[in-house]
Image (spheres, grey):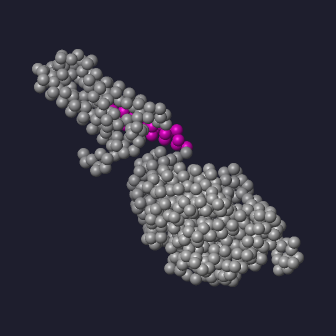
Amino acid sequence: MKIPPTSFKNLYEGDNSLKLLDQSYLPRWMVVIFDTILSALSLFFVYIILLGTPIKFHEILSLPIQALIALTVTVVYFIVFKTYSGIIRHSTFTDILKLVISSFSTGITLVAINLFYSIQNDGKLFITTGILLYMLISFTVLLLFRLVVKESYQLLKNTAGDSVIKRVLIYGIDDHSLNVGKSIIADNSLGFNLIGFINDKFQSKGGKISGKPIITLQNNFENIIEDYKIDAIIIAENSYSIKQKNSIVELCLANNVEVFNVPSLEQLDTSEKIKLQIKPIQIEDLLERESIAINDQLIKLDIEEKTVLVTGGAGSIGGEIISQISKFNPKLLIVLDQAETALHELELHLKEQNPNINFEFELASINNNERLVSIFSKYSIDIVYHAAAYKHVPMIERNPREAVFVNVQGTINLATLSIKHEVDKFVMISTDKAVNPTNVMGASKRAAEIYVQSIQNEPNVRTKFITTRFGNVMGSNGSVIPFFRKQIAKGGPVTVTHKDIIRYFMTIPEACQLVLQAGTMGHGGEIYVFDMGEQVKILDLAEKMIRLSGFEPYTDIDIQFIGLRPGEKLYEELLNDTSKSLPTHHSKIMITEVPLTKYTEVKSKINEIILSAYQDDDSAVVFLLKDLIPEYKSKNSIFEELDIIVNRPDDFS
């Protein structure tokens, strides 16, 4: 028998501890006891077999003492080779190999004891025939025990769970889908009964893969589902585009069939990997976003062996930026956030996942300038990624002064200290809501953009100030997708602000990849905007999410229109009417040309805004923001009346 080259390595890999109190499966100490009892039973079989033969047991030691020695040696090798470590109902080749080695070692040891005794004394302790029989019988009994348990478990599982095992077809035929199919066939515990493969690319008659039929799709999807009594479709082929996946999903939803997705993996060689990766398809899988290619080498040159500060590090965007920076071997990664619990949890996670990266975690608010002074003095910072911000539009519309303290003054604090300490690069995360803003949040971010752009051209400013601007990020804190998902889980209703509202969407990883890439391009003063793809109608998004969850919109789960929230507009922009974009060497990143304002003028106006915030005068704050940002027009807000008098400041009091 040829032993796989990794088998000996696997003997000691993974979780091999005895775990005396673990009840998630048959406790390992009980496995040792059962195996010992079976070994004792094997000795009894040896005695019965030899009892009627001319072969006689040696009488130097009594039979019970001989049996006790044999069992002691056996148990020692059970522990040495950890034959108990595998879960019996999932026994593998490695587990069987451990039994073989343990039994063989027991036999060799007993023979060695015999030989050593015969050299020192006259005679032997054990008969050689008995040792050989014990090796053979004990291994056979232990192996049969595991096979019986494994098959019994599968039989009981299949019988008990027959009603919930799904009859599935795999859509598409390539190496990836074939690997998924083989894994499903090999492991009933996945909960799928593979019926066959759907082929939509070439004609085939009577073909089979792994014993399962290849079913040709010829505009008869509904008939296939009905004829084969299919419960679900698994999309596993790598070559399908997002648009093609959407078409497949629409077919499935129209026929009340569940859809599962398997992302592209290099290898799917274990059932555990398959089990983790076959998941109900999510709306994120169907949003039409092309994959983004980034230049890892440029980012590595930018970050490797540098001290990097990330503000808002415990947030969804900041956390992903940290995760991606960790791949490029920074000298020190400083994580700053004011959210204590989130920062603590992130610290535990990052230190576990990245033990070779030097982290420092600073609990601080960016509008506490004295605290920031101590942090910048403590570390020699090379790059700042500024992701800290207040971003929830309705909340900020009710608290304009807080937006000024964090989004504006906090940015000024960081920018001023970056200049003082000669930080190489300052990358600010902005938002599409800063373009032609209709709410305080967007206006506060635009004010921060204007400030860092204007200060770039001041004398003796060596820090490169780079701004990145993008739209909604799927899965981020406050994003509409997890909000809809919670509403669906509760049985609805799903609330949409307006039937015509549309938004750009981008995944958290790709947004942060583009932030890092844009950071390598900037010479200072640029505002980079990202290609966000096509805008998505939020009503369509809600309807599809309900259908993907197995419900019918308006019937099983209602959709209610609640009206635009304060400061919300029907659509977002990445450029304003007076700016234009220029291409960069990356197809997904553009530079927007925005008219610049003199630093002295910007500083004077922003100082007034900050002073009004400290005076707790929200109306003055918003009025002065409108003066700084002429395109800022409030929508669905109590501040709309200020737009009437913004050009007549003498009327404002």
**Within the magenta stretch, is there residue 148?**
yes
Q: Is residue 515 visible?
A: no
Q: Is residue 418 visible?
A: yes
**Camera-side residue: 81 or 214?**
81
Residue 575 placement: quadrant: bottom right
Q: Which x, y percent locates residue 141?
A: 32, 31
**511 to the left or right of 488:** left
**649 to the left or right of 1:** right
The image shows residue 652, relative to residue 253, as above or below, that is: below
**Camera-side residue: 279 or 297?**
297
**Camera-side residue: 548 or 369?**
369
The residues colored magenta run 140-163
The image shows residue 536, relative to residue 192, as above or below, that is: below
Q: Residue at x 67, y 79 (%)?
A: 599
Residue 483 placement: quadrant: bottom right
Q: Residue at x 23, y 23 (%)?
A: 49
**Camera-side residue: 431 or 108?**
431
Q: Which x, y percent locates residue 498?
A: 75, 66
Q: Which x, y percent locates residue 346?
A: 56, 53
